[in-house]
Structure formats: structure tokens, C-alpha cells
Amino acid sequence: MAAPDHRAVGHGRIGGLADVPILSVDDVTREAQKLARERPGQERIAELCGHAPYVRIDGLNAGYGKMEILHDFNLQVAKRQSLCLIGPNGAGKSTILHSIFGFTNIFSGTISVDGRDITAMSSKDKLRHAGIAYILQDKSIFPDMTVEENLWMGGFLFEKPARAKETAERVFDKYPRLAARRKQPARVLSGGERRLLEISRALVMQPDVLLVDEPSIGLEPRFIDMVFEILGDLQNTEGKTIIMVEQNAKKGLEFADIGYVLVSGQIAIAGPGDELLENPEVGRLFLGG
């Protein structure tokens, strides 16, 4: 996103001590388009994942209805790597996640996981057979169901309900904080606990790839840190591959191995997360200074 508040990026001193130019969303988009004049090539994209892609997108043109949002889009992420997508509003960041999971119209191009073409698979087959789980933005839990029942819902594709319950128990073993509330309605959970439940529900199907949409949205800072610690554990301890859209660009790039800056459905900049954090243009447009 363009800035933490989604509306503007401020520069200069606070409190009227100096003129403070403000970049609107449209300004950020126009400025970001200048960055896209030299798009990273396939070699750079491959280099960032060590030439060993686990999730790969090649020449993707995709969108909604007849509207094309992504244009000749390429992506490569290795197993156990994390990728953070940033950019101005409307750049196509969530459309990438939607396309991988099967929520868009694919006009051309391919999406593969571990060398297997999954482009035409349905969302449920991508979850069941390709090991891809989508963690939605906030408020995707069922508030009147118990924490335990919410977790069971994560295994709705299992042929036997007992398997969902068995897998849910392993999740409770991993996260005692949820286990302590298992019989309580999900509506009583704090914001951080709700996000933990959303992540945990996605783990019931034991996916290899996590598509994470705005993990920090609506959370207090202490819960944001907790969520990123959980995601880091899933990547580094359990070997998950994570592709994330994050409105808090600084936090996302600090977390991720790779960062892509998107502009108008294409990659403008690609590099290691820490390298993008040091890029002055990325800082000016997306990091608040």
C-alpha cells in the first residue's frame, strides 16, 4: 500500500515548523510508475529465489470479468522463502494472491507449484492437492462458533471429520493460547487471538504454501509483532513458503526474504527485503519518509 494510513505520505517536520509536502495515493502511483521504467528481468526474479522456484508464475495476464489487472506478471519463490508484495492501492497485489488460489480469470500464462502446473485447478483442489492455503484479511472467523469449531472448519475438505479434529489437536498443541479458549465463542478473542485463529485454521489442511493477505491490518503493535513471529516460525521451523500482501510495508519488508514493488499490475522493483528497505525511493513512497 502507499502508506500506513492508505492515504498519504508526509515529508518534512511535524507541527507546522516547515512546509510538509503530502503525497496523495494518486501522487504515489504516478511517482511509482517512474520506478517501473526498468522492470526487473527474469534473471533477477530467478536469482532472488536461488534459481530454485517452488511457486512460480510465468507471463500471467489475469483479472476479474474482462478486466485485466496483471500484465505479463512473473514471480518465483523458493521453498521456505517469504515474499512480500507492496505498492500503491490498485497495483494488483491481492490479485496475485487471488490468481494463485483460483479467484480470478486467467487470460494467459501459467502458475506452478513444485513444478506442477496448477493454473486451471479449482480453489478447493489447490488447497486439497497442491498444498496452498489462503489466509484472508481480518474478520473471516465464525464469531458464534467456538474456537474449536472454527479450527474444525479448516478441515472441511477432509473426507472424514475425525481427521480435521485430529489435525486441530496438533494445532492446539502448538498454540496453547488457543487451546485455553477452545470451548469459548470466537467472538470473545482479542484481535491478535483472532488472527492467530485465522492462521491456525489454515494450518489444519497442512499446506506447504501460505497466501497471507494483510496480516497486520487492524491490529495493535504488540499483536502485529506476535503475528509476524508466528509467520516466521511457520517459515523457518515448519518450512512453509509464504507469499504476503502487507499494508505495513516496513514490517513486511523487515520480515520477508524477497520484496516486490508492484505498479499497475507489473513488478517495478524486486530485491531482498532488507535491500528494498534501504532504497530511498521505496522509503519515500511507501515507508513514510
Image: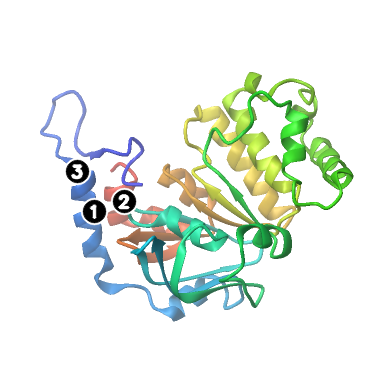
Q: Which mark is residue 152?
A: none
Q: Is residue 240 left or right of residue 92?
A: right
Kind of residue at badge 1: Thr
Picture quarter with the C terminus:
top left
Mark 1: which secondary structure? helix
Task: Give above or below for 5 relative to 81.
Answer: above
Residue 63: image location, x then y, percent: 40, 62
Residue 170: image location, x then y, percent: 84, 42
Q: Is residue 186 left or right of residue 22?
A: right
Q: Nearer the viewer, residue 202 or 245?
A: 202
Kind of residue at badge 2: Pro
Q: Which mark is residue 29?
A: 1
Work out whether mark 3 precedes mark 2 in sequence or the reverse, and give the earlier one. 3
Q: Which mark is residue 88?
A: 2
Task: Give above or below for 95 relative to 38.
Answer: above
Question: At 47% across and 77% down in the image, what residue appears?
Answer: 109
Residue 99: image location, x then y, percent: 50, 62
Question: At 38% across and 57% down in the image, what residue appears?
Answer: 92
Q: Is residue 55 left or right of residue 9?
A: right
Mark 3: which secondary structure? strand
Viewer-nearest of discs 3 and 1: 1
Q: Residues within 10 Å of mark 2 (few under 14, many from 20)?
A: many
Mark 2: which secondary structure? loop
Kind of residue at badge 3: Leu
- Residue located beneath label 3 in the image: 23
Q: Residues within 10 Å of mark 3 (few under 14, many from 20)?
A: many
Work out whether mark 2 precedes mark 1 in sequence or the reverse, and give the earlier one. 1
Residue contact between numbered discs 2 and 1, judged by CB atoms under 8 Å: yes
| Residue, far front | 65
Question: At 81% across and 35% down in the image, what residue appears?
Answer: 172
Quadrant position of residue 207? bottom right
